[in-house]
Image (cartoon, grey):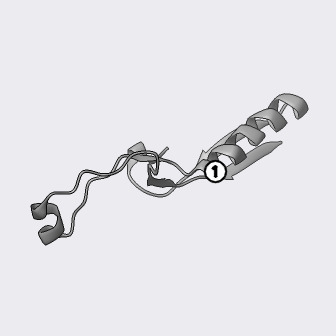
């Protein structure tokens, strides 16, 4: 059996992004990206299910290579 978990990156809400006037003008604010906290719960549950039922778990995400 395989357990698939869909995950996505979200800005880290525990840290305020540093915004300069140039960032506002260009529209590009840099923020630290982390796994969506709710997706992290799902990934943990997939691991536990995998251990319990001898299943493989896989995380699926769209985005840049560092998204997973």
What residue lies at 71% left-to-right and 47% top-to-bottom? Answer: 42
Residue 31 lies left or right of residue 38; in this view the side is: left
Residue 64: percent from left, percent from top: 38, 52
Q: Please indicate whether residue 56 sits to the left or right of residue 37 in the image.
A: right
In the depicted structure, whether residue 57 falls above or below residue 25: above
Outermost left residue: 22
Specify few, some or many for label 1: CA neighbours under 10 Å numbering under 14, 14-19, or 20 or more.
some
Q: Identify whether 32 is placed above or below 52.
A: below
Decide: is 26 above or below 12.
below
Helix, strand or loop at disc 1? helix
Location of residue 59 by image quarter = top right
Q: Between residue 56 and residue 41, name the one nearer to us.
A: 41
The image position of residue 31, as x and y in percent, is: 32, 51
Front residue of 30/55: it is 30
Across and down, in percent, residue 68 comes to 49, 43
- Residue located 25% across and 60% down the image: 29
Q: Nearer the viewer, residue 47 or 23?
A: 23
User: Residue beneath label 1, please?
Assistant: 39
């Amino acid at each position: 059996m395989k357990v698939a978990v869909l995950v996505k990156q979200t800005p880290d809400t525990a840290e305020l992004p540093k915004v300069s006037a140039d960032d506002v003008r260009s529209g590009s604010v840099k923020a630290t990206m982390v796994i969506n906290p709710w997706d992290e719960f799902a990934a943990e549950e997939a691991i536990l299910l995998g251990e319990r039922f001898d299943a493989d778990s896989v995380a699926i995400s769209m985005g840049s290579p560092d998204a997973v």
